[in-house]
């Protein structure tokens, strides 16, 4: 029976468990590759989760790493069979950068998402009209619609039952920035109120007078995982991913999110502020 798990998640499972098994066996990537008469790049691609793994190659690795527990082997073989094929976002490849496609793979496996954007409402929370209004000045209509379609499908997957715990700090000035005009903003703010009432979604608002902080000039997303280090995605023209290898930068953004969360209004106060701004939009 074919796996219903996205291939990127099976590749991620193999990436984590095979790397851990190699390290436990006391082998470097170079030594493991040389022993199997593989190129080093092949092993690196497997351990970064960028390629599928055949069952034959998996068995060679497990023999080298002396993994013979039947249950563990069966689970990894199932992951290897499910590592082939395309992920849901590949049909949107024409509007994806490689960095963002890689990010979507990690986001699909995250157990928590924490996000902040100093200029606009984060893409996880966009309505279609708001997203189109953002894109239209710089992207042709057909391409803009493709990007919006990707964004909407991504939202469906994130906010589906059993999805990650999602926390967003919204900047008050972003809520007041009239993207697309009054009706578009009013609908967008109504959407925020709807989302804030959903289980697993936490929306707070950073007041306009909160002052400077580490991410005043840029946006970021922190992804948390049950079985791996946190991951940082910095949103700019090309996007960039930062893993636990850069602990100093990761710590700065983790501290930043805690700082702005402490300054933000939450719960009923956040709802009241969003509602007040929405009513102001209705009077424009």
Image (tube, helix red, strand yellow):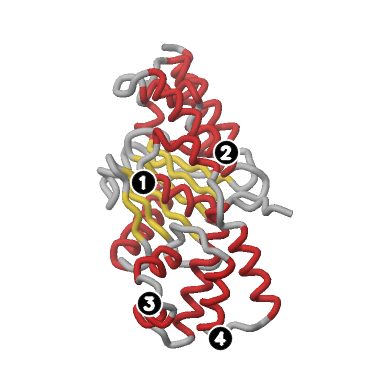
Sequence-first tag of 4 and 3: 3
Q: Is residue 241 left or right of residue 49?
A: left
Residue ID at (53%, 46%): 86
Residue 226 or residue 13, whichever sits in front: 13
**Contact? badges 1 and 4 (CB < 8 Å):** no
Q: Is residue 43 left or right of residue 246?
A: right
Q: Residues within 10 Å of mark 1 (few under 14, many from 20)?
A: few
Q: In the rendered image, which quarter is residue 77 located in?
A: bottom right
Count of marks overlaid on the render? 4
Residue 229 or residue 31, whichever sits in front: 31
**Residue furthest right in the image:** 1
Q: Secondary structure beneath disc 1? A: helix
Q: Residues within 10 Å of mark 3 (few under 14, many from 20)?
A: some
- Marks 1 and 3 sit apart, C-alpha to C-alpha, by 24 Å
Residue ID at (56%, 49%): 85
Q: Secondary structure beneath disc 4? A: loop
Residue placed under numbered mark 4 in the picture: 66
Residue placed under numbered mark 1 in the picture: 98
Sequence-first tag of 2 and 4: 4
Sequence-first tag of 1 and 3: 3
Residue placed under numbered mark 2 in the picture: 196
Residue ID at (29%, 66%): 248
Residue placed under numbered mark 3 in the picture: 29
- Marks 3 and 2 sit apart, C-alpha to C-alpha, by 46 Å
Whole-percent x, y for residue 242 in the image: 34, 59
């Amino acid at each position: 029976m074919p796996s219903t798990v996205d291939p990127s998640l099976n590749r991620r499972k193999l990436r984590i468990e095979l790397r851990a098994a190699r390290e436990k066996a006391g082998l470097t990537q170079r030594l493991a590759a040389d022993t199997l008469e593989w190129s080093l790049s092949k092993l690196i691609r497997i351990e970064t989760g960028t390629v599928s793994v055949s069952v034959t190659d998996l068995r060679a690795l497990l023999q080298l790493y002396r993994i013979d527990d039947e249950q563990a082997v069966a689970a990894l073989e199932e992951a290897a069979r499910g590592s082939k094929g395309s992920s849901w976002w590949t049909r949107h490849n024409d509007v994806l950068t490689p960095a963002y496609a890689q990010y979507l793979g990690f986001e699909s496996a995250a157990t928590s998402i924490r996000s902040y954007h100093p200029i606009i409402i984060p893409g996880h929370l966009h309505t279609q009209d708001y997203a189109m209004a953002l894109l239209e000045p710089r992207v042709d209509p057909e391409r803009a619609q493709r990007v919006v379609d990707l964004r909407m499908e991504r939202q469906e997957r994130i906010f589906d039952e059993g999805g990650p715990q999602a926390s967003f700090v919204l900047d008050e000035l972003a809520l007041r920035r009239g993207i697309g005009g009054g009706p578009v903003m009013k609908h967008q703010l109504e959407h925020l109120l709807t989302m804030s009432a959903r289980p697993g979604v936490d929306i707070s608002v950073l007041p306009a007078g909160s002052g400077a902080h580490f991410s005043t000039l840029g946006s970021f997303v922190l992804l948390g995982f049950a079985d791996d280090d946190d991951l940082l995605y910095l949103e700019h023209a090309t996007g960039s991913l930062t893993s636990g290898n850069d602990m100093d930068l990761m710590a700065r953004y983790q501290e930043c999110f805690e700082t702005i969360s402490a300054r933000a209004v939450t719960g009923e106060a956040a709802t009241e502020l969003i509602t007040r701004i929405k009513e102001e939009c209705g009077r424009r």
